[in-house]
């Protein structure tokens, strides 16, 4: 491996996700293993602009593999979107002798990394961290598996209330542009209907499905709704429409919100973070740059950042077919 890089900076940016701390730990310990200095960059790109850095050694990341959120904090930086802001960031990196970057985040974070690399030639590797699982080039992003488990656990509890009171619950989950969370948790929790941005179910089909559920003897129902679903303007409008057209239903809405981002990461996310962090450091030491490390067919692989940013993740059509059968 090349000895060229002597110090690597690691940062988390955008929305937090369970598994980010495990990824930080992996990057720091991989650096220690290969005798490379590691610098933690606090508050994402804003911290880079302000020089908010801290040396990190193998012992500085003990007892964080099980923690949600990110010890490096996360912030969105409008200043980094400007040429002047990126110039400040570059000067701070030079002062700290940081020669390469590992960026843990989503497509917005990767866009910033790609532009920064293009302007200043600092090697960068991205690690995908977002619960939405909406990044091209990986089957799983950090935090996605944990979020699925969190949502299924909550829906199971909501179902207890729904069945006790003969109610219909609309449960809104995260997924503005992608329905991965809704589709998987809907199947896993046995939802009667699943509404996702990729498939316009239509209001009439939704009503017909609920009528069938009622006629089949179901006294309560769960409908999982991705926040980006196109049927109604929002989940509350859906509730109002159903109440107007199916007055026999007692309808409630539960918006799960940011609880989906929190909590201790699952074993899967901890292992994934460990694999991706090691691969990110090794890729930089091998002279690679402008790639995202991801998981494809259970193998850690590299995808050019540009493809990761511009590529479109597809919903699993087999899962859609299964959900149609399961909601019969």
Image (cartoon, rainbow, N blue to C red):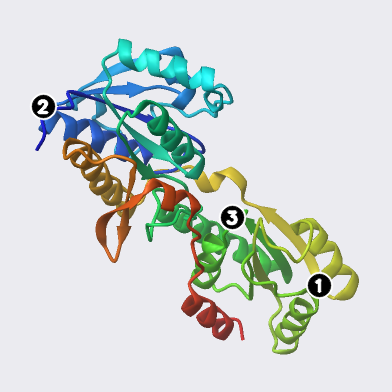
Q: Residues within 10 Å of mark 3 (few under 14, many from 20)?
A: many
* Category of crowding for the residue at label 1, using alpha-carbon neighbours closer than 10 angstroms: few (below 14), some (14–19), many (at least 20): many
> Is residue 303 something that shows in the picture?
yes
- Per the image, label 2 sits on a secondary structure element best described as loop
Which numbered disc, 1 or 3, marks the residue that appears first in the sequence? 3
Q: Quadrant of residue 55?
A: top left
Q: Earlier in the sequence, mark 2 or mark 3?
A: 2
Is 279 positioned to the left or the right of 86 in the image? left
Which residue ends up furthest to the top in the rendered image? 95
- Tell me: residue 115, above or below residue 170: above
Circle 3 SS class: loop
- Position of residue 287 relative to residue 223, above or below, is above
Q: Which residue is mark 2?
A: 35
Percent x, y of residue 56: 25, 21
Q: CA distance from mark 1 to mark 3?
A: 26 Å
Looking at the rendered structure, which numbered label has been put on residue 215? none
Q: Quadrant of the N terminus?
A: top left
Which residue is depicted at the point 27% across and 63% down?
Answer: 298
- Residue ID at (55%, 86%): 325
Determine the residue positioned at 46% across, 47% down: 130
**Which of label 2 and label 3 is nearer to you?**
2
Is there any visible trace of residue 70 in the rendered image? no
Q: Is residue 213 above or below residue 94?
A: below
In this rendering, the label closer to the viewer, 1 or 2: 2
Q: Are marks 1 and 2 in contact (CB under 8 Å)?
A: no
Q: Residue furthest bottom?
A: 216
How far is disc 1 from disc 2 in space, using C-alphas?
A: 64 Å
Badge 2 local density, few (<14 within 10 Å), some, or many (20+)?
few
Q: Which residue is mark 3?
A: 175
What residue did someone put label 1 on? 249
């Amino acid at each position: 491996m090349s000895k060229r890089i002597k110090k690597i900076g690691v940062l988390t940016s955008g929305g937090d996700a369970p598994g980010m701390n495990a990824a930080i730990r992996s990057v720091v310990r991989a650096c220690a293993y290969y005798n490379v200095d590691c610098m933690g960059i606090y508050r994402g790109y804003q911290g880079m602009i302000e020089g908010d850095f801290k040396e990190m050694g193998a012992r500085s990341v003990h007892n964080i593999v099980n923690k949600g959120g990110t010890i490096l904090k996360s912030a969105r930086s409008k200043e980094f979107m400007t040429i002047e802001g990126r110039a400040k960031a570059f000067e701070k990196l030079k002062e700290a002798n940081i020669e390469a970057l590992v960026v843990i985040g989503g497509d917005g974070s990767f866009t910033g990394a790609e532009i920064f690399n293009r302007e200043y030639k600092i090697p960068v590797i991205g690690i995908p961290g977002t619960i939405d699982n909406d990044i091209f080039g990986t089957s799983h992003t950090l935090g996605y598996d944990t979020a699925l488990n969190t949502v299924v656990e909550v829906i199971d509890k909501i179902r207890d209330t729904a069945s006790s009171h003969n109610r219909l619950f609309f449960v809104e989950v995260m997924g503005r542009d992608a329905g991965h969370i809704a589709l998987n948790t809907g199947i896993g929790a046995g939802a009667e209907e699943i509404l996702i941005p990729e498939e316009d179910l239509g209001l009439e089909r939704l009503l017909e499905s609920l009528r069938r559920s009622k006629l089949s003897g179901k006294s309560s129902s769960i409908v999982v709704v991705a926040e980006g679903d196109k049927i109604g303007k929002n989940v509350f409008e859906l509730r109002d429409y159903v109440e107007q057209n199916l007055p026999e239903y007692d309808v409630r809405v539960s918006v799960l919100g940011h609880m989906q981002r929190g909590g201790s990461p699952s074993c899967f996310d901890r292992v994934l973070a460990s694999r991706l962090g090691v691969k990110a450091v090794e890729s930089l030491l091998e002279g690679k740059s402008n790639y995202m490390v991801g998981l494809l067919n259970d193998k850690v692989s590299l995808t050019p950042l540009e493809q990761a940013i511009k590529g479109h993740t597809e919903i699993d059509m087999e899962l859609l077919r299964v959900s149609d059968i399961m909601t019969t």
